[in-house]
Amino acid sequence: MAAVVLTAVVAVGWLGVMWWDSRLPGTYNVLEHGEFEHGGGSDSGDLVGHVHLSQLGESVTTLHGPPRGTPDATFALTARQATIELGSGRPVQALTFNGRSPGPELRVRQGDLVKVTLRNEDVEQGVTVHWHGVDVPNAEDGVAGVTQDAVLPGEKHVYRFRAKQVGTFWYHTHQVSSREVRRGLFGALVIEPTERDAAGLDRVVLAHTFDGLPTLDGNDAAHRLDVEPGTSARLRLVNTDNSPHRFTLTGTPFRVLAVDGTDLNEPDAIRDVAIEVAGGGRVDLGFTVPDRPVWLSLADTRAALAFNTDQAATPVAVELPTFDPADYGEPADTPFDASSPFDRRFELTISRKPGFFDGRPGLQWAINGRIFPDVPVFHVERGDLVEVAISNKTDADHPMHLHGHHVLVLSRDGKPTSGTPWWADTLNVEPGEEYRIAFRADNPGIWMDHCHNLLHAADGLTMHVAYAGVSTPFVVGGEHHNEPE
Ligand code: C2O
Ligand code: CU
């Protein structure tokens, strides 16, 4: 009897300690938590121990865009609460940039010096702007508590960066992002090549669910568009939701021109294939407008773009196969590949594990068997060639997003990619899948690496890639109540 009681007391006590330990402190530096991993490379930099590491090295604030020079493109984004109206007239109490959601579309040219002034009128928990998919210098990355403080009501923050890439990107707040992005604080960012293609239709299509209603560009129903037959069209699909969206383009063959802002090599014309876009991901489609109706539809919803027709989108009767970039298009040279000598190799294994997250018991997300904040920090040095094996041992999709870098997809489930080079910044890893990806550590800083199902991220599916010799003076919590997730 006494033994049973003692065992029970010990068990309860142990659970109590687990619970107590799991509570996140009100204020902490992201480098103080987590377990540094070195991926087989050197560990210079964190020999001093985690507690001090956050204070050592160059501050992220020094890793900024060009401080001087006249900007080529200047924008002002003001965050405020507003009531917006969906296409059907239904009102939504939203959080907006400039009174709209989606916020204004920012279009710039490659090479432009971009300046964006963010102001917060009345979004109580604060805002930031993260340039999703744009590999900006670390200080411009817009992560509250890591690269800046949240911009509270009445405050402002200026971002300056050179637009070096070309493609389809988006921007969104990275303060309390699981709630603020859902409520509307996002918009599209397009970087056009200096030599722009001859005039055609070039249109961003943002999928977002407002109050449970799926929309395309804020339209919850079919939206009609008249386009001259023969026009060459580029549709830039952006998924701003947490889960993958399936798009169908019916009535015309098309090419998949780009994934996550990077053009694909020699894309073949295809048809009757559904395009799945990861939460946070982008896919560009190209086609020549035929003299028949064409529909772009968001599967299982009423949202659609109807080209040259009054009819609502035809329901897609047949189960369409899903587009797969792994064997699409033609191979081309890449700066490194699966046979390159890697400086570091990491594993990133996502599983579920019973335990406590911030004082809450339950089945938690775990990375490499550990629950946030004890998740890994991948330590890299400037110039390293890094390989990461990502595997998903859960039954949910995880669109994994690394800030500040594009990753080259090497293989999936052991099978090497065989078509176009496939560069991603938001890679949807389905249940049971394993990907090998690689990137060049050429953008020093402290970078989030997280699931872009922002609810998963808020529940701990988030970690960092940290460069040796870089520190951050910002903290999660603190006076600005920074809360990146
Ligand atoms: Cu689109 Cu960390 O974000
Ligand atoms: Cu996830």
Image: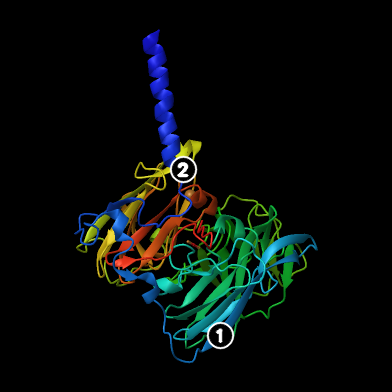
Type of amino acid at the residue the image marks with label 1 = Thr
> Which residue is disc 2 drawn over?
23
Picture residue at 63% right of the left edge, 55% below the top: 299
Picture residue at 51% right of the left edge, 60% below the top: 482
Task: Give the vertical position of 8 relative to 357 (above or below).
Answer: above
Picture residue at 79% right of the left edge, 60% below the top: 90
Q: Quadrant of residue 242?
A: bottom right
Mark 1 nearby-residue class (10 Å; few <14, some 14–19, many ≥20)? some
Closest to the observer, 145 or 295:
145
Residue 54's spot in the image, x, y percent? 33, 61
Closest to the observer, 393 or 128:
128
Closest to the observer, 341 or 54:
54
Identify the mark nearer the N-term, 2 or 1. 2
Type of amino acid at the residue the image marks with label 2 = Arg
> Which residue is disc 1 drawn over?
74
> In the rendered view, does 217 fall on the left or right side of 465?
right
> In the rendered view, does 334 fall on the left or right side of 72?
left
Q: Quadrant of the N terminus?
A: top left
Residue 69's spot in the image, x, y percent? 45, 91
Name the residue at the bottom extreme.
70
